[in-house]
Amino acid sequence: MRTPSDPWHFARPELAGGYLQAFDLGLVSARGLFARRRMGKSEFLKHDLLPAAEAAGYLAAYTNLWDDADHPGQAIATAILSAARPKGLAQFWEDLSTPIRKMKAGGKLPLGVEGSLELDLADKEKLAVPAIQAALQAADKTRKRLILMIDEAQVLAAPEHRQVAHSLRAGLDIRKASVKVLFAGSSEAALREMFSRASAPFYNWAPVEPFPLLGDAFVSATVAQVKRLAKQPLALADARQAFLSLKETPEFFRWYIERYLLYQGQGPELALQHTLARVHDDSGHAKAWKAMNRSDRAVLLLAARGVQDLYGAAALTQLRELMGSGDVTASVPRSALRRLTGPKMQAMARVDHGLYRFEDPEFEAWVRSRRTID
Ligand SMILES: Nc1ncnc2c1ncn2[C@@H]1O[C@H](COP(=O)(O)OP(=O)(O)OP(=O)(O)O)[C@@H](O)[C@H]1O
Ligand SMILES: [Mg+2]
């Protein structure tokens, strides 16, 4: 199930060992970690802590709630269950959902809906509370301890996920010795808020602390790897300088290394210039995005995700979801597209009826990587 290992991954075994040891000592059973975006939280959880935990005899479950922010409950249940019982996931949901299926089949449904006995995601999310309980019970049965890593955990703090949050806490509180939880997120404020509001389900659950950042050892290891692979070695001093200029951000540093390797003839200075421009472009996109209104962003996001008919019924449903509003009619995408294709923005161009393309593929890729319209 593991993806092939990335030769550029800088392993952090001491850091992983430190977290495991703290859990082993039993002083804490949950911790909250924060660091700015692109600093390596997810990479550490997935590629360092998860394998280290498994090697130490834990079951290890990882989930990133941003992958599907509307359905955190099923993401958590599925993650726990795949760690505890990698086979039989489909059957698990099947069994849990039998009562709902029966209800759907037996009750009077509006014309045309009879066929849709398939469980949709919203149905599944209603099952999240029993699903989390059942998944934790499956973990109990293995008699192994479980480490549960919840990335972008702040999603759980939203009011609509209160029930899931409460049931998760209840399930974990009675398993403090056997289940350890790591919450991660990129907003310190959001994480702190989650654990400090007295009325919230997470109150006082986990101490919130900074995630240790990558530094000189990461830069040196990357330089050593360049030396192994490239004709033209990269001087450590140049790499250090670049890391600093790129605000010590591992993701940007990887862009720099990539550029350096592809255009070795151009040297480290030009690679850095190019990377700084790319980082800047990235924030240019952010500026353009911020200046747009919500419906324009929602339409752009659908287009970037490859939705073809932007006026169609399916698109309207998705727009309602993205915008969190029931009253979205076809006039919403119509006027959004008029603005987006207009001379002021020139973000999109019309190809055919209802079919549009981005003017700038870089911006399209940037929009595609958004999870929400915020
Ligand atoms: N240990 C590492 N070794 C090599 N590269 C790394 C490492 N950690 C992070 N990176 C680089 O930085 C990128 C961003 O890391 P990651 O996605 O883990 O950040 P994050 O803190 O989870 O950010 P976000 O808050 O945006 O989710 C990775 O895709 C990778 O290119
Ligand atoms: Mg992340």
Image: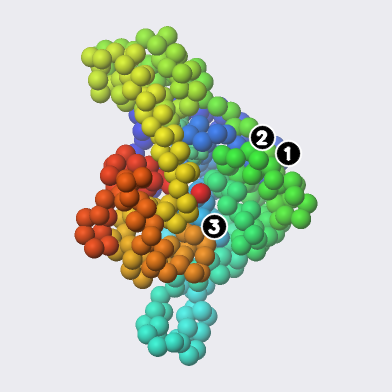
User: Relative to 366, is 145 on the left or the right?
Assistant: right
Q: Which colour scheme appears in the figure?
A: rainbow
Residue designated by label 3: 72
Q: Residues within 10 Å of mark 1 (few under 14, many from 20)?
A: few
Numbered label attached to residue 209: 2
The kind of residue on which mark 1 rests is Leu
Instruction: Give the residue pinned by disc 1.
Output: 27
Question: Residue 245: where, in percent of width, then height?
Answer: 46, 18
220 displayed left or right of 182:
left
- Residue at 61% x, 62% y is 160
Distance from Cα at disc 3 to Cα at disc 2? 23 Å
Q: Nearer the viewer, residue 356 or 13?
A: 356
Q: Earlier in the sequence, mark 1 or mark 2?
A: 1
Q: Position of residue 65 (x, y in %)?
A: 52, 51
Which sits earlier in the primary sequence, circle 3 or circle 1?
1
**Residue at (36%, 45%) from the top-left corner?**
345
Q: Secondary structure at mark 3?
A: helix
Query: What kind of residue is marked 3?
Result: Pro
Q: Is residue 223 visible?
A: yes
Q: Residue furthest front?
A: 343
